[in-house]
Amino acid sequence: MTEHYELIIYEKKDGVATITLNRPKVLNALNSSILKEIWDALQDAEADESVRVIVITGAGDKAFSAGADIPELLEKSPFEARTYSIWLKDVLRYMERLQKPIIAKINGFCLGGGLELAMACDFRIASTNSRFGQPEVNLGIIPGAGGTQRLTRLIGRTKSMELNMTGEHYTAEEMYQFGLLNKVVPPEELDNATNKLIKSLMAKSAATLGIIKLAVNKGIEMPLEEALFYEAECFGIARSLEDAVEGLKAFLEKRRPEFKGK
Ligand code: CAA
């Protein structure tokens, strides 16, 4: 586990672990070293029981992340580029099965691998000045970590094909219309909007949220019949929690539930 992060800022406060991509001079581009630090921080956040919600954001006021580090990509051999793509895939897959909500707080350019990172999060809140796209095609390459796959699942084939083939930039409002974003707010309201979501998540059972996350993320990869069975299994597990007894009782007793995450 990396103890001293150099390319990210990793903070834990009041149940929230925040990972800030911290290469503002290159618009928080994702090289192999920053990826390793993100991976370490995520593992720490998962293991730390005090962490309830994870936020990923970018340092500076210009970018969440402008994608994979282009000079590094040029240096890599095709085989090394494939290894990088698999490694990036593994980090993003880990985010999808890590049983805590992850919020992408998007504050500027969110392009290529940056958009792919945001798409592996559970929520995406963006400021109005953010810009989105899969511009890999302009570099003569293709997305290497879900741009042709997660994007299609999130916004559908028509718009995914358009983004991937034109490589153009889209506004936050457009991406909200396409269904990629949960919320779009002016830059000065980004913190408040994120905190409001965090507060709502904190009031729930952490264990129940973890089960919902897996039910959604695993279920979408299954045929409907199997997915519905999987949901029924998840439902049984959720019902077996102490928090389920607390939640059901609290409703009948007309009081707020006090969840313990058990
Ligand atoms: N990698 C490395 N450095 C990058 C970068 C990237 N992805 N994006 C920007 N930078 C660097 C620039 O080279 C520049 O550095 P210098 O000051 O040393 O010249 C600095 O960040 C600021 O960038 P610009 O001067 O270009 O800023 P701008 O405001 O004029 O333009 C931008 C901003 C439109 C985002 C433009 O920088 C850009 O198009 N960046 C590339 C975006 C891109 O193509 N991303 C896809 C990468 S490939 C990928 O992600 C593959 C994958 O799926 C894993």
Image: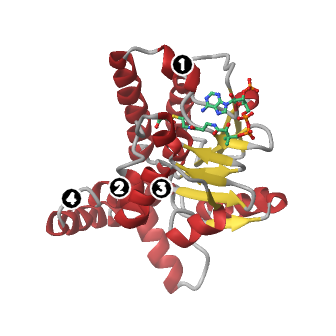
Q: Which residue is pictured at 59% across the width and 61% down the height?
A: 201
Q: Which residue is pictured at 40% across the width and 39% down the height?
A: 142
Q: Is residue 262 visible?
A: no
- Tell which tag, 4 or 3, sits nearer the viewer: 3
Tell me the distance, in whole angstroms, between the alpha carbons under discs 4 and 3.
Answer: 26 Å
| Residue type (three-letter) at the residue carrying disc 4 | Met
SS for dot 1: helix
| Residue type (three-letter) at the residue carrying disc 2 | Asn
Residue picked out by circle 1 = 72
- Tell which tag, 1 or 2, sits nearer the viewer: 1
Q: Looking at the image, is 238 positioned above or below residue 118?
A: below
- Tell which tag, 3 or 2, sits nearer the viewer: 3
Label at residue 217: 2
| Residue type (three-letter) at the residue carrying disc 3 | Leu
Badge 4 crowding class, 10 Å Cα cut-off, few under 14, some 14 to 19, many 20 or more, is few
Task: State yes or no: Cβ of the residue under disc 3 lies below 8 Å from any atom of ligand 1.
Answer: no
Q: Which image quadrant is residue 30 in?
A: top right
Q: Is residue 188 left or right of residue 196?
A: right
Which of pointers 1 and 2 lies earlier in the amino acid sequence?
A: 1
Q: Is disc 4 in contact with disc 1, using a CB cutoff of under 8 Å? A: no
| Residue type (three-letter) at the residue carrying disc 1 | Glu
Where residue 47 appears, as percent x and y from the top left, is 50, 33
Q: Quadrant of ligand 1?
A: top right
Tell me the distance, in whole angstroms, between the alpha carbons under discs 1 and 2.
Answer: 31 Å
Q: Looking at the image, is 202 positioned above or below residue 174?
A: above
Tell me the distance, in whole angstroms, between the alpha carbons under discs 4 and 1.
Answer: 36 Å
Residue picked out by circle 3 = 163
Q: Looking at the image, is 49 positioned above or below residue 38?
A: below
Tell me the distance, in whole angstroms, between the alpha carbons under discs 3 and 2.
Answer: 23 Å
Q: Is disc 4 in contact with disc 3, using a CB cutoff of under 8 Å? A: no
